[in-house]
Amino acid sequence: MPARRRLDFQWNLRQLMAAHQLWKTTQLVPLLAERGVKLSAAQVYRLVTDKPERLSMKTLVALCDIFGCSPNDLITPHVVAAKAPKAAAGEGGAGSVVAMPVEFQPERARILDDDTGDGGDGGGG
C-alpha cells in the first residue's frame, strides 16, 4: 500500500489583519457584515485565532475582499513530514517479536485449596 501524504495548512488571517492595522478581532465583525457575512464576535475570534476546519466560500471571498488578497494569501498549504513506518514482525530491528524456546515458556499454574489440598472442589476423596 503506498504511503499517504498528510497535508496541513497555515492560516494567515491574523498576519493579514496586522498588515492592515486591525489589531482586535471585533474590528473584523462590521467589515464582514458589510459583505453579508453575519458572524458573532466569538465566531470571528475563533476564525482569527484558530485554524478553521470548515470555511464557507462566502466568508472566504469576504475576507479576500476586505484585505485585497487571494485565498493563497490566507492559506499556505504544506506537507507534514511522514513518520517512519513500523517494521513488520520478523524483519528484525528493535521491538520485533522473537520466538521463545519451549524450555522458557511458562507452565500452567494449579491452584490448590488451603484446607483440603485437593484443588478446591471440597470433595476430599
Image (cartoon, rainbow, N blue to C red):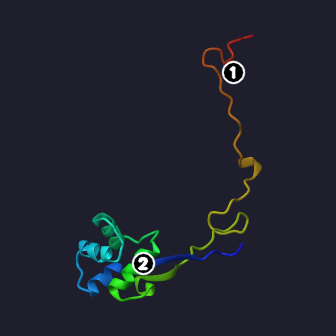
Q: Helix, strand or loop at disc 1? A: loop
Instruction: Provide residue 74's location: percent of width, then percent of height.
Output: 40, 82
Q: Is residue 107 above or below residue 16?
A: above
Residue 31: x %, y % from top left:
29, 77
- Asked whether residue 12 appears in the rendered view, the answer is no
The residue under the point 35% across, 89% down is 68
**Residue 6 or 67: which is nearer the viewer?**
67
Position of residue 9 relative to residue 86, above or below, is below
| Percent coordinates x, y for residue 54 in the rendering | 46, 69
State the residue at coordinates (32%, 69%).
Answer: 44
Q: Amino acid at mark 1?
A: Gly
Residue 16 in view in this figure: yes
Q: Which mark is residue 60?
A: 2
Residue at image mark 1: 119
Q: Quadrant of the C terminus?
A: top right
First along the sequence among labels 2 and 1: 2
How many residues crowd around disc 1 within 10 Å: few (fewer than 14), some, or many (20 or more)?
Answer: some
Secondary structure under the numbered disc 2 in the rendered image: helix
